[in-house]
Image: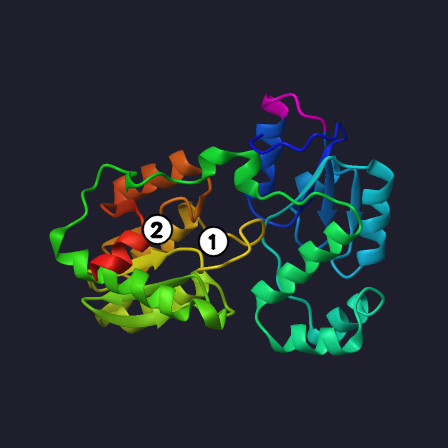
């Protein structure tokens, strides 16, 4: 594990949904690192919950902290998909750990600020928080082509437009992905996430008989500038390819070193099969070239 802390306790994976927690647990086992699983009820997969050392409700912050205090971890990693709880419920859960004025500010702002507060709270309780890419560095893609489908020259401007728009949107904590056709941004990810954004994009591109039109659009996805990289780095995987194909897109452009590529081999195989390009670009180079 890169940047491993000096402490000798276990690495605790606080597990939400999807494949990412299992990928991290496999990486830890491969390196013979002692680890524990704190699964989030309602989010972690059933099989993972059966393996978990403890299962807690996402709003049971005190219970989660009690587990961590007993386990004395060397590091804590939050991994996997969760949905933000209802504001009133989350406000109540955090009330014992944050003053009301700070909570009101957090609830009025975006998810990045809320996640920063969660990281800060864990650190205040003496825990070293690491990102998924610290445990499994190969989740991040280096610049270049990931699959076998070349990036068409016709989408160069689309890719640059997408990275420039994401950079411009960074201060507003809106989303980490968008769809571009030509130099026109046709869909921006909001709180609904990438999958639902792509479903929306698909509804705009469908022709007769509900067949997706071949639009030549591009999904561009990257971390926000100044984002807390230890939590909520954007991720892509096989389902992203499926949704992009349904939307009639030509390919997927991700920020090199900025996006977690989950189930990489499966994703690349699916992209190759569907004739979709999959490539990583340096976001700053793309913005500078615009």
Which percent across, then down, holds residue 271?
A: 30, 43
Q: Relative to residue 140, is residue 67 drawn left or right?
A: right
Where 31 sits versus 59, above or below? above
Q: Secondary structure at mark 2?
A: strand
Q: Is residue 137 left or right of residue 76?
A: left
Against 207, is 82 above or below? above
Question: Within 10 angstroms of label 2, few (less than 14), some, or many (20 or more) residues?
Answer: many
Q: Count the marks: how many?
A: 2
**Residue 149 spot, x, y in % from top left:** 21, 41
Between 184 and 122, the one lying in front of the other is 122
Magenta range: 29-34
Name the image quarter holding the N terminus.
Answer: top right
SS for tag 1? loop
Please report whichever mark, 2 or 1, sits nearer to the chain's N-terminal start: 1
Judging depth in this view, the residue of 200 and 136 nearest the camera is 136
Q: Residue furthest left?
A: 153
Q: Please tell me which residue is depicted at 27% across the width and 65% down the height of the picture.
A: 180
Q: Does the rendering let one see residue 218?
A: yes
Q: Residues within 10 Å of mark 1 (few under 14, many from 20)?
A: many
Considering depth in this image, is 276 or 106 the residue closer to the camera? 106
Residue found 82% across the figure and 50% down from its top? 65
Main SS, magenta region, reads: loop
Tag 1 residue: 234
Does residue 71 appear to the left or right of 79 in the view shown? Answer: right
Q: Position of residue 270 (x, y in %)?
A: 33, 41
* In contact (CB < 8 Å): disc 2 and disc 1: yes
Numbered tag placed on residue 254 in the rendering: 2
């Amino acid at each position: 594990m890169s940047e491993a802390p000096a402490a000798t306790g276990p690495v605790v994976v606080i597990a939400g949904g999807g494949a990412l927690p299992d990928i991290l647990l496999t990486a830890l086992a491969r390196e013979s690192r002692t680890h524990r699983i704190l699964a989030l009820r309602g989010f972690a997969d059933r099989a993972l919950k059966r393996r978990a050392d403890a299962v807690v409700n996402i709003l049971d912050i005190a219970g989660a902290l009690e587990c961590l205090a007993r386990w004395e971890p060397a590091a804590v990693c939050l991994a996997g998909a969760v949905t933000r709880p209802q504001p009133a419920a989350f406000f109540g859960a955090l009330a014992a750990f944050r003053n009301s004025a700070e909570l009101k500010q957090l609830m009025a702002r975006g998810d990045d600020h809320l996640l920063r507060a969660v990281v800060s709270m864990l650190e205040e309780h003496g825990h070293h928080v690491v990102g998924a890419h610290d445990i499994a560095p190969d989740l991040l893609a280096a610049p270049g082509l990931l699959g076998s489908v070349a990036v068409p020259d016709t989408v160069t401007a689309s890719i640059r437009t997408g990275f420039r728009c994401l950079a411009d949107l960074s201060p507003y904590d809106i989303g980490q992905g968008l769809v571009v056709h030509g130099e026109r941004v046709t869909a921006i990810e909001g709180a609904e996430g990438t999958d639902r954004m792509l479903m929306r994009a698909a509804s705009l591109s469908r022709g007769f008989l509900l067949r997706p039109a071949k639009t030549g659009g591009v999904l561009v996805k990257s971390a926000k500038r100044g984002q807390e990289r230890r939590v909520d780095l954007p991720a892509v995987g096989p389902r992203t390819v499926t949704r992009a194909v349904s939307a009639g897109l030509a390919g997927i452009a991700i920020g090199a070193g900025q996006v977690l590529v989950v189930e990489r081999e499966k994703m690349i195989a699916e992209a190759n099969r569907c004739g979709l390009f999959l490539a990583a670009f340096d976001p700053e180079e793309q913005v500078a070239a615009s």
